[in-house]
């Protein structure tokens, strides 16, 4: 549950936070919502609106590229979070 919420927050920080928060705020604190369900909803919301393309195939490619970029940025945020937590842990122990 906690890991899913941390991942969802990282997606929101890396993507379209305003759109993402508006779409998942009811799910975020609901204990009955599974982690994967929340992460999927957050990822889709954090991608935000993809520019309209003239064909459906171009639209899917644009969505996939946005999803890959969102995942890369989220990875950097999670890596920084783990690094900071490690430094804090070493400082106090």
Image (spheres, grey):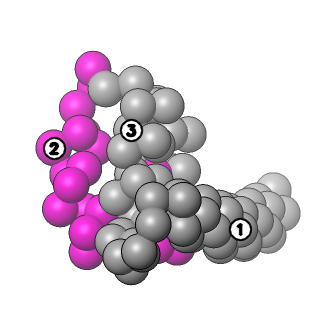
Residue 30 magenta-highlighted: yes
* Residue range of the region highlighted in magenta in the rendering: 8-32
**Along the viewing direction, whichever of 91 and 49 lies nearer the viewer:** 49
Vertical placement of residue 60 versus 39, above or below = below
Residue at x 37% of width, y 44% of height: 41
Vertical placement of residue 30 versus 18, above or below = above
What residue does disc 2 label?
26
What residue does disc 3 label?
38
User: Dot 3: what SS?
Assistant: helix
Residue 24 magenta-highlighted: yes
* Image quarter in which the C terminus is found: bottom right
Toward which corner of the image does residue 65 lie, by quadrant? bottom right
Is 15 positioned to the left or the right of 17 in the image?
A: right
Per the picture, the main secondary structure of the magenta-coloured stretch is helix
Q: Percent from the top left, x then y, of residue 10?
A: 52, 62
What residue does disc 1 label?
72
Q: Percent from the top left, x then y, of residue 40?
A: 45, 41
Q: Percent from the top left, x then y, of residue 20?
A: 30, 63
Residue at x 54% of width, y 68% of height: 58
Is 31 positioned to the left or the right of 72 in the image?
A: left
Q: Tell me if I can see residue 29 in this picture.
A: yes
């Amino acid at each position: 549950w906690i890991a899913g919420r941390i991942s969802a927050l990282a997606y929101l920080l890396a993507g379209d936070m305003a759109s993402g928060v508006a779409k998942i705020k009811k799910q975020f604190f609901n204990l009955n919502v599974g982690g994967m369900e929340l992460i999927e909803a957050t990822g889709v919301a954090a991608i935000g609106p993809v520019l309209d393309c003239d064909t459906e195939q171009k639209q899917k490619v644009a969505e996939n590229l946005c999803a890959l970029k969102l995942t890369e940025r989220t990875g950097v945020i999670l890596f920084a979070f783990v690094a900071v937590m490690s430094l804090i842990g070493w400082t106090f122990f």
